[in-house]
Amino acid sequence: MITKNSIITLILAALPYLLFGILWFSEIIDVNMAIQFALFISANASMCSLFGLGWVNDFPKWTIHSIGFCLFISIVLMNISSPYLNRTETWGLLGLLPFALTLIISLSLRFSSQPLRQLFKQIKEDKSIIIFILYGFLPLMLRFEFDEIYHIRVIPFIIVLTTLTILSVIIYLISSK
């Protein structure tokens, strides 16, 4: 039975994927860079917020995919450079800033290793959680796959892939209850 609380958690779990889809769509239709930057920040912040909520609440299943994303985006940010920000060398340890900031805030709200123990307990009971953690990589992987393809013909793919990723998160969460 789906309750109001479960609908809210499903929306919170799927929201980052929707934001990444909107960001990807905005890049194709060449929206203003300020709007694209705001979408990029909000998509990443929503996934990092899920990680923080997961830490504070012992990683309920609807927050677990954010772990994979936060780790992957940190690795990606560590290995990029930003010439348009007058930064020609790679970001290095500065790439860990979003993950570290999220972790510091989460630890300040709940300074405990209990969330990690609970996460490992969940993984031990249900191995599919490992795949769900890796599923957090998907928005970035899809974006990388279509990198440098800025054509109007990509829009149907964006819509279908975004819809499929959102639906698969929702179906996994509903089926695993």
Image (tube, rainbow, N blue to C red):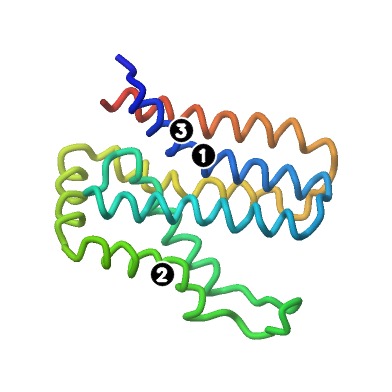
Label 3 vs 2, first from the N-terminus = 3
Q: Residue 86, how many percent across, how many down?
A: 73, 84
Write down the quadrant of residue 148 in the picture: bottom right
Mark 3: secondary structure: helix
Between the residue at mark 3 and the residue at mark 1, the CA separation in whole angstroms equals: 6 Å
The reply to whether the C-beta atoms of the residues labelled 3 and 1 are less than 8 Å apart is yes
Please state if 114 lies on the left or on the right of 101 as rendered: left
The quadrant where residue 110 appears? bottom left
* Residue 62's disc number: none
* Residue at image point 50% right, 61% down: 73
* Residues tagged 1 and 2 counted as in contact (Cβ below 8 A): no
Which mark is drawn over residue 15? 1
Front-most of 69 and 26? 26
Inspect the image, locate mark 3, and give the three-letter code of the amino acid beneath it. Answer: Ile
Residue 143 x, y percent position in the rendering: 64, 50
Q: Is residue 104 left or right of residue 48?
A: left
Residue 88 location, x and y as percent? 69, 84
Q: Residue 38: image x %, image y %?
A: 66, 56
Figure check: 49 above or below 85: above
Mark 3 Cα-neighbour bin, 10 Å: few <14, some 14–19, many ≥20: some
Task: Decide which of 19, 166 is in the foreground and name it.
Answer: 19
- Residue drawn at the location 46% of the way across and 60% of the way down: 72
How many tags in the picture? 3
The residue to which callout 3 is attached is: 11
Q: What element carries label 2?
A: helix
Residue, disc 2: 101
Quadrant showing the N terminus: top left
Q: What's the CA distance linking mark 3 and mark 2?
A: 24 Å
Tell me the distance, in whole angstroms, between the alpha carbons under discs 1 and 2: 21 Å
